[in-house]
Image (cartoon, grey):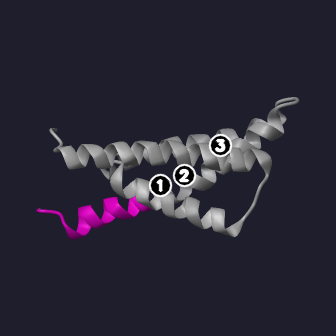
Amino acid sequence: PDLDHKEQIMKSIGKWLYLLGILVAGIVGLLGFSANWLTIILVLVGILVAIIFVDSDDIVNIGIRYLVLAAVHGVLDAIPAVGPYLTGFFGGVLAFMGPVVLTALVIYFIRKYFFSQE
């Protein structure tokens, strides 16, 4: 579908926020850094990303990707030498992705059950 200029800009901003959120959350998880202010910022960025970038109609695929990432995250510790680092990185990514997936799910249900034209 054709998006007008403003929608294209919003999608582009959303894409960059998504990438930045994943990188920041992954690096924070890798380093084991923990701060309440950073957690709040990442949650808010995740919600914003879900609103302006994620296609809530694709919720099944989003959920499957999240669950696969969670399953893989659970076994990364077994890799010699780098396992704990990978676990930390992907743990941070999962922490960022949780609000994204949850917000996309809420948007999907609101659109389907409250704004449906059927």
- Magenta span covers which residues? 103-117
**Quick one: 41 or 63, which is closer to the camera?**
41
Residue most extreme to the top: 80
Residue at the location (29% across, 45% down)?
A: 9
Q: Of discs 3 and 2, which sits in the foreground?
A: 2
Q: Are marks 3 and 2 in contact (CB under 8 Å)?
A: no
Element carrying mark 2? helix
Q: Are marks 1 and 2 in contact (CB under 8 Å)?
A: yes
Q: Where in the figure is residue 28, as x and y percent of width and height?
A: 71, 50
Element carrying mark 1? helix
Which residue is labeled 2 in the image?
97
Residue most extreme to the right: 81
Q: Is residue 74 left or right of residue 12?
A: right
Q: Is residue 22 magenta?
A: no
Number of other residues with Cα within 10 Å of mark 3, as a class: few under 14, some 14 to 19, many 20 or more: few
* Label number found at residue 101: 1
